[in-house]
Amino acid sequence: MSRPGLIAATLLALVMPAAPAGAAPGTTLEASVDRNRLGAEDTLVLTVRVQGEGAGRAGAPSLERARDFRVVQGPSVSTQFQWVNGRSFSSKTFTYVLMPRHEGQLQIPALELEVEGTALASQPLTVEVVQGSLGTPPGRRPGTIGRRSPQAPPPIEIEGSQVRVEAELDRERAFVGQQITLTYRIYTQLDITGLELVDAPSYPGFWVEDLKVDPNPVGRRAVRSGEEYTEFTVIKKALFPTRSGRLEIPALTFSLGVRGGGGDPFQGLFFGSGQTVYRKSPPRSVEVEAVPEAGRPRSFGGAVGRFRLTVSPDRQESRVNDAIVLKVRVDGEGNVRSVAPPQLPALADFKAYDPKVEEKSSAEGDRLKGSKVWDFVLLPLAPGPQEIPPLEFSYFDPDSRRYQTVRSSPVRIQVARAAADSGPSTADLVVPREVKPVGRDIHHIKSAPARLRGDSRPLPRSPAFAVTLAVPALGNALLGLWRWRRDRLGGAAGAQRRRRARQRARRSLGRAAQAGDGTPAEFYDAVSRALREYVADKLDRSAAGLTQGEIEQALERAGVSHADRARVRGCLESCDRGRFTPESGRPKARLDLIGQARAAIDSLEGRL
Amino acid sequence: MRRPGAALLLCVATLAGGGAVEDRFAGAGHAYEAGDFAQAEIGYRALLEEGARAPEVYYNLGSALYRQGKLGAAILSYERALRLDPGDADTLHNLEHCRQQIADRDEPPRHWTTLAYQAWSRRVGSSGEAWILLSLYLPGMAALGVWVLHSGERVRRAARFAAVLLLTLALPAAALVGVRAAVESGNPEAVVLADKVEGRSGPGADNAVLFSVHEGLKVQVRNRAGDWVQVLLPNGLNGWVPDSALETI
């Protein structure tokens, strides 16, 4: 290389910044804190430094994982370049002011950063956080980053007790819905130049309303722990518990600008001596009790405090289908925003629409007061004098620990028929409506029954029922048994009679044949009787009154052939003839008849 | 115009002095109407202890209990009134009114056969079923007796036909009476009287909690073991609860 070229190259290397390049392996990430022990109301300074080639292009590390701290200031960034032996080295420093969220051994986890594609990580840091404030570390203004410049006035040494914040409650026990006034006061021995809330206040379990405080509060003298302070009331809130149990009011962190009270006023005037300190209010808790169940009126809708009820119509005369507005107003001391509307009674002759609601609240002293107005639009449906029954509103008075019920006066509306000029469809229009129940309850008790004493058991459980079932069954069983025995015995006699019928008949016929010298009437009568008794024996019935016609029918039913029936009939007719005609009583004729009768009996035997 | 003071004096005197059952029933009613529901409860309970177990007494006792906020006891009393007079519209209404206020859903039956049986039960009841059975059974048995005794063929034939017809018709009525008696004696029903009671997997406080039921729910009693009873809920769950937490209807 020529000499001029060498000079030019040297100048270029001195003038040009380091060319962009990937992060060298020597690039490092370091994190450090200015103190390892601090109070919960103190701050610490976290310094994160990236060194090496490419450090100038590093972005700010994320502190999302440092959940035990909140960032109250930062990051502020400073960058440095160095030329060493013709090579450029850079470092970038990110500075944060952190405030611990709680006490204990807290950790700032390893911070991660990616520089030119290379992942870097710092070492984790541990700090001890104790209650209250330990003051400001030497050489640092509280709540500020970096060390003071030579021109700045010396920092004030602020002790933790010189500035404090208190959260005061007007009561530590309350009912659900009862107002608790929470007041934040600053007690300071220094001048306060500014006030900010570090984070938005949160009160889980409470309905919160802000109470007014003087935006330019005037301090007043107060003594705390034997020391004199100036007291400022900075925030007031009305808290209304929404549930029972022990409810916590978390600490609230304030950022306070302070100025040394005993310093040189000129110094503060020209150089400014303001510093920032952070203070937390102590966490508080409230024991909240549910409103009692006993004696709770039906119209209680959760209102707690002291209220009045006013009900008024916009007018007292109207027409059918001409709407009126019923204004229901509840006002008093308590949280009116959570007050439910009084139940409008069921109005058969009005159609009620959902009300328009208007509410106002304001603080009177430290107590929240307000009013809530419901405008019910009511459409008269029937003409005549109408009455809106009294409305009822109940609230719980926490001072007397009792429920109170207020009632409005009844509202009377004179409703005329619809105007004739309001149109043919609406004039005198009364729409028949179904009668609807307006309430529910049990039916009334009964008057004396006809019979109070005696067995009121259901019939199936009565012994008489079982007896009533058993007796007829038993009786019929006994009757059946008796009948069976009778049939059994009666059947045997009949069978015997049937068996012996032929024998008896032959014997009777034999006796008739032997009595040949008897009168014809006696002979024929004996033959006729023998035949009839034979048939009667076979049929197991009495021979008395057994006519020839009945014999004929019985034989026919028994399936006896016509010829056999004719033979029997012939015998019987011969007997009837012989009894009244003497010539037919000759011996031969008698013997023939005996023979015919025997033949007839033989022919019937086996068929009957 | 009501005169609660005079009515109260009258009823207290009646209740304290004994007297006819009807007078004391009326006295308890006066106490109820005067708003002294506790005194009315005492009066009705005394009547029941004396054996005046009429449905009206149970009904009025249920109303006096309801007015005092004793929902479970009121439901129990109405259920007992319903057992004696299943078709009483007032009792059915009040029972339904009470059931709408209990914390646990008393699952209504969905199957039409169950609904039909319930409607039949409300209209007829066990006594009605028994009367139907008797009105068929007794004439049937009488006809059977005629058939057994009479010798005339035509009369016997007619008696036999009547007996078969009537006794056949009596069979379903007998089945209803029998099934109801078996169900009521086999699975008695009870009402939860405690505000809240936990159903456990076994008879004892050491067993796992399966469910919790509240005052007024009607359950079936399935089993007993010492001071614990196994109950079946309307939705089919079953578990063991302390005997003292409920009372059988």
Image (cartoon, rainbow, N blue to C red):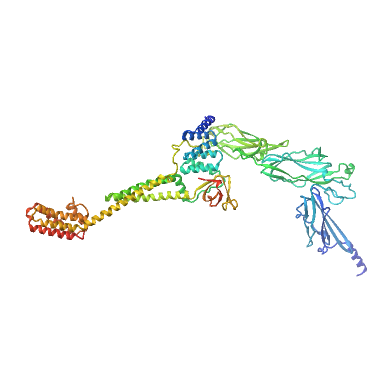
Farthest residue, direction bottom: A1
Which quadrant does the C terminus of chain A fall into?
bottom left
Which quadrant does the N terminus of chain A fall into?
bottom right
User: For this view, does A172 lie left or right of residue A296?
Assistant: right
Point out residue B161 in the picture as x, y percentages from the top left corner. Answer: 32, 51
Q: Quadrant of residue A86?
A: bottom right
Who is closer to the viewer here, A357 or B36?
Answer: B36
Point out residue B76 in the picture as x, y percentages from the top left corner. Answer: 52, 43
Who is closer to the viewer here, A169 or B190?
Answer: B190
| Residue A570 shows in the view | no
Point out residue A433 in the picture as x, y percentages from the top left corner. Answer: 51, 39
User: For this view, does A401 lie left or right of residue A445?
Assistant: right
> Measuring 11% from the left and 52% from the top, which residue is drawn there?
A522
Who is closer to the viewer here, A360 or A299?
Answer: A299
Number of numbered markers? 0
Point out residue A199 in the picture as x, y percentages from the top left corner. Answer: 75, 47
- Placement of B130 over or under A346, stated as above or below: below
User: For this view, does B156 lie left or right of residue B209?
Assistant: left
Farthest residue, direction left: A583
| Residue A428 shows in the view | yes
Farthest residue, direction right: A3
- Placement of B167 over or under B58, stated as above or below: below
